[in-house]
Image (cartoon, helix red, strand yellow):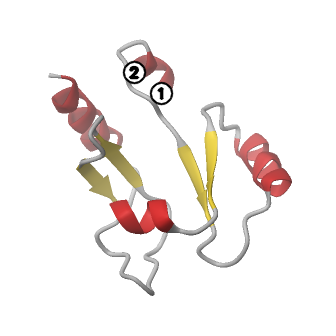
Amino acid sequence: MWREYRDRGVAFLAVATAEMGPVDRDETRRWAKNMGLTMPVALDLTVETYRRYDPLAGANRVAPFPRQFVVDRQGRLLYGSRRYDAVALRRALDAALR
């Protein structure tokens, strides 16, 4: 999906979060390669990014993964989901691009 939307100004980013312990760059690269990810992968070493966008993540709590978010250019959360739903994600992306 990211290849379809990237030419429309949408940036996709996978975020490896240190929710269960330290995030290792090399281990994350191996994981992304094994998963077949071709989009960029960032490291959230402090879990700050995750807590900012996940409404279920409190100051000392991390909700289950994976998560999908649509965030606008101002950093506002437009869509969030606990499970991958291609139809809903596509709908949110199209609405954000209008």
Q: Decide: marks 1, 2 in contact (CB < 8 A)?
A: yes
Image quadrant in which you'd find residue 88: top left
Residue 65 x, y percent position in the rendering: 50, 66
Q: Which mark is residue 5?
A: 2
Residue 43 against residue 75 in the figure, above or below: below
Q: Residue at x 62, y 35 (%)?
A: 40
Residue 93 point in image, percent of width and height:
27, 32
Residue 37 higher or lower than 48, as above or below: above
Q: Position of residue 69 (x, y in %)?
A: 35, 49
Look at the image and tell me in which quarter the C terminus lies.
top left
Q: Residues within 10 Å of mark 1 (few under 14, many from 20)?
A: few
Q: Find numbered disc 2 in the image and state the secondary structure of the residue it sits on.
A: helix
Label 2 Cα crowd, 10 Å radius (few <14 / some 14-19 / many 20+): some
Residue type at mark 1? Trp
Q: Is residue 46 shown above or below 38?
A: below
Q: Residue at x 70, y 38 (%)?
A: 36
Q: Read off the residue under disc 1.
A: 2
Rendered position, 89 above or below 55: above
Q: Which residue type does callout 2 highlight?
A: Tyr
- What residue do we see at 45% from left, 28% from top? 1
